[in-house]
């Protein structure tokens, strides 16, 4: 990730300018120079010097169309602020290669000072479509001005809190390590998503394990994945699984809970039938979730 290399080029004063713009973006998309000066607590000369530097590094976007010049952060700057904080907190020390790319996020491998390898999930919701706003209405609430950066921050917070809740059950879901802004650090399984396997060992056993995990999560913490399929179940060569991507989860008392659970189970059953010739009964599986 090229943006991580920029961290070495930035001084604490540069980061403070970026954070000042971030604070101002809570009120408006673009932040005027005078407001950046106010939030950073720098003199105007220092403010302009730092703005020129981070603009040259392509970390901010300039708007000179109004009576006063204003700036907004781009996604690279937001990445830098989050990564800087995670490094400062000793959560990670190195960012590795890209290991996954989805519609809503990029996933990189990363490492801490002890050599532990984690996954860094970086939300990128703004690159899909505005329809995502509707799907995230429950976390956005009634907020007025919203930037895509802040929507990604809310998404990361929602998934991290879900992972914390589920991980208490010690099942095959990612262990949440930390999060900052739009980046979640979590445990990493060296495997690939089910969709990319042509064949697997003991498919019936793996199918049953996934269903059992979902049932326990449903029963114990009252949660439904809400977006489950062959793209968000990771499998390694030893047969270990990891059920990932919990952003769309809903509580079992959600108005659409029954239909979302049925869709999750139906997606799994259909995939295992078509890909691995495993026969199953969706209604029987659903009934097993509802048994007291």
Image (tube, rainbow, N blue to C red):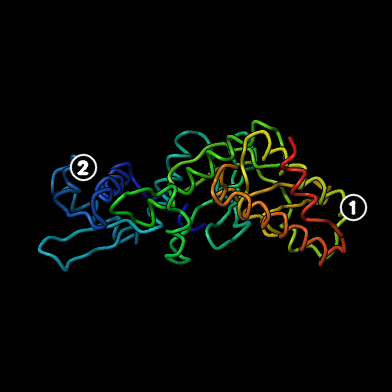
Label at residue 17 = none
Q: On the rendered image, what quadrant is the C terminus found in?
A: top right
Residue 246, image x, y percentages: 59, 48
Q: Are marks 1 and 2 in contact (CB under 8 Å)?
A: no
Query: Dot 2: few (<14), some (14–19), or many (≥20) neighbours within 10 Å?
Result: some
Q: Which residue is mark 2?
A: 39
Classed neighbour count for the residue bearing mark 1: other residues with Cα under 10 Å, few (<14), some (14–19), many (≥20): few
Name the one closer to the observer, 132 or 2.
Answer: 132
Query: Residue at image x 17%, y 55%?
Result: 32
Q: Position of residue 174 (x, y in %)?
A: 65, 42
- Which numbered tag is attached to residue 202? 1
User: From what the image shows, is residue 38 above or below residue 122?
Assistant: above
Horizontal side, residue 255 vs residue 206: left or right: left
Residue 88 located left or right of residue 288 = left
Judging depth in this view, the residue of 177 and 43 nearest the camera is 177
Q: Position of residue 39 (x, y in %)?
A: 21, 42
Taking the spot 57% from the left edge, 36% from the top edge, the residue there is 177
Query: 189 or 150, which is in the foreground?
Result: 150
Q: Secondary structure at mark 2?
A: helix
The tag earlier along the polypeptide, 1 or 2, is 2
| Front-lying residue, 169 or 7 | 169
Tell me the distance, in whole angstroms, between the alpha carbons under discs 1 and 2: 59 Å
Q: Residue furthest left?
A: 67
Q: Give the residue furthest to the right.
A: 202
Helix, strand or loop at label 1? It is loop
Q: Along the horizontal axis of the image, is 96 left or right of 67?
A: right
């Amino acid at each position: 990730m090229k943006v991580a290399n920029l961290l070495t080029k930035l001084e604490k004063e540069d980061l403070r300018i970026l954070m000042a713009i971030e604070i101002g973006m809570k009120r408006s998309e673009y932040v005027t120079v005078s407001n950046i000066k106010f939030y950073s607590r720098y003199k105007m000369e220092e403010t302009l010097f730092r703005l020129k530097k981070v603009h040259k590094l392509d970390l901010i976007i300039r708007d000179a169309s109004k009576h006063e010049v204003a700036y907004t952060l781009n996604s690279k700057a937001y990445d830098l602020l989050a990564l800087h904080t995670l490094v400062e907190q000793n959560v990670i020390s190195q960012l590795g290669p890209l290991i996954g790319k989805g519609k809503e996020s990029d996933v990189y491998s990363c490492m801490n000072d002890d050599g532990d390898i984690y996954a860094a999930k970086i939300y990128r919701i703004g690159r899909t479509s505005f329809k995502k706003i509707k799907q995230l209405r429950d976390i956005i609430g009634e907020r007025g001005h919203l930037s895509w950066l802040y929507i990604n921050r809310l998404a990361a917070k929602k998934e991290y809190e879900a992972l914390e809740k589920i991980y208490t059950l010690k099942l095959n879901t990612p262990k949440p390590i930390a999060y900052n802004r739009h980046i979640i650090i979590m445990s990493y399984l060296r495997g690939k998503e089910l969709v990319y396997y042509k064949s697997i060992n003991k498919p019936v056993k793996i199918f049953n394990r996934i269903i059992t995990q979902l049932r326990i999560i449903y029963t114990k913490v009252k949660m439904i994945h809400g977006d489950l399929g062959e793209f968000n179940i990771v499998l390694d060569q030893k047969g270990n699984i990891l059920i990932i991507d919990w952003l769309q989860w809903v509580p079992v008392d959600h108005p659409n809970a029954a239909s979302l659970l049925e869709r999750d189970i139906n997606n799994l059953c259909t995939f295992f039938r078509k890909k691995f010739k495993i026969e199953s009964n969706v209604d029987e599986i659903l009934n097993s979730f509802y048994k007291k």
